[in-house]
Image (cartoon, grey):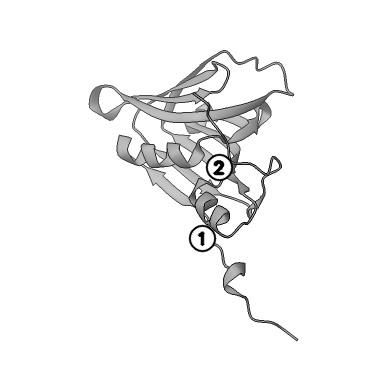
Amino acid sequence: MTQDATFEDGREAPLNLGGLDAEDLKVISSLAQDAVFPITEMTWRAADRRFAVLLNRFRWEDADAAKARKRKVERVQSLLVIDQVLNVASQGIDRSDKDTILSLLSVTFEPGADGAGYVGLTLAGDGAIRLEVEALDVSLRDVTRPYLAPSKKVPDHPL
């Protein structure tokens, strides 16, 4: 016997966003804020000009609904991919410590000449990654089903 799904069983569709300008990137940054990831889950494929990070993203788009329905908050694994990458630099990150967990605070774009520029990934604890790009081409795509946030809390940024 099968049972029809209830309204509560429904979920928004997984995120699959692309960003080609600074305004698009603001949306992606707001949805990726407070994502955490092991240092081993980021990679740069120079030959493909692609930088990618597998994030454990807090589901900001669902946080208010979860609170209103007294549900626990969720995270989801998402791929943050930056294409057209010419060079990668970082500071405040020890790549040799494979147990490091990083926390993403923001994704920004500093424009240069002819559509080129720099994508910046600001990390908690004064870490940063700077990607020199030929053109802004960023995507954020959920790749798993949402799961209960282990902390059971909404990320907080005290002043």
* Drawn side of residue 69 relative to residue 81, left or right: right
Name the residue: 43% across, 41% down: 28
What is the distance, in whole Å, between disc 2 and disc 1 at their CAs? 15 Å
- Dividing the picture into quadrants, the one containing residue 5 is bottom right
Is residue 119 shown to the viewer in this render? yes
Do tag 2 and tag 1 residues touch (Cβ < 8 Å)?
Answer: no
In x, y percent, where is residue 39?
A: 65, 26
Position of 110 relative to 138 (above/below): above
Name the residue: 50% across, 29% down: 105
The single residue placed furthest to the left in the displayed view is 114
Q: Residues within 10 Å of mark 1 (few under 14, many from 20)?
A: few
Instruction: State the SS at label 2.
Output: strand
Front in this rendered view, residue 125 or 119: 125
Amino acid type at mark 1: Ala
Q: Residues within 10 Å of mark 2 (few under 14, many from 20)?
A: many
Front in this rendered view, residue 89 or 2: 2
In x, y percent, where is residue 48?
A: 50, 33
Front in this rendered view, residue 61 or 158: 158
* Drawn side of residue 148 relative to residue 108, left or right: right
Label at residue 79: 2
Instruction: State the SS at label 1.
Output: loop
On the rendered image, what quadrant is the N terminus found in?
Answer: bottom right
Label at residue 24: none
Amino acid type at mark 2: Leu
Position of 37 relative to 132 (above/below): below
Name the residue: 69% across, 82% down: 3
Q: Label 1 belongs to which residue?
A: 13
Name the residue: 47% across, 42% down: 31
In x, y percent, where is residue 116?
A: 31, 26
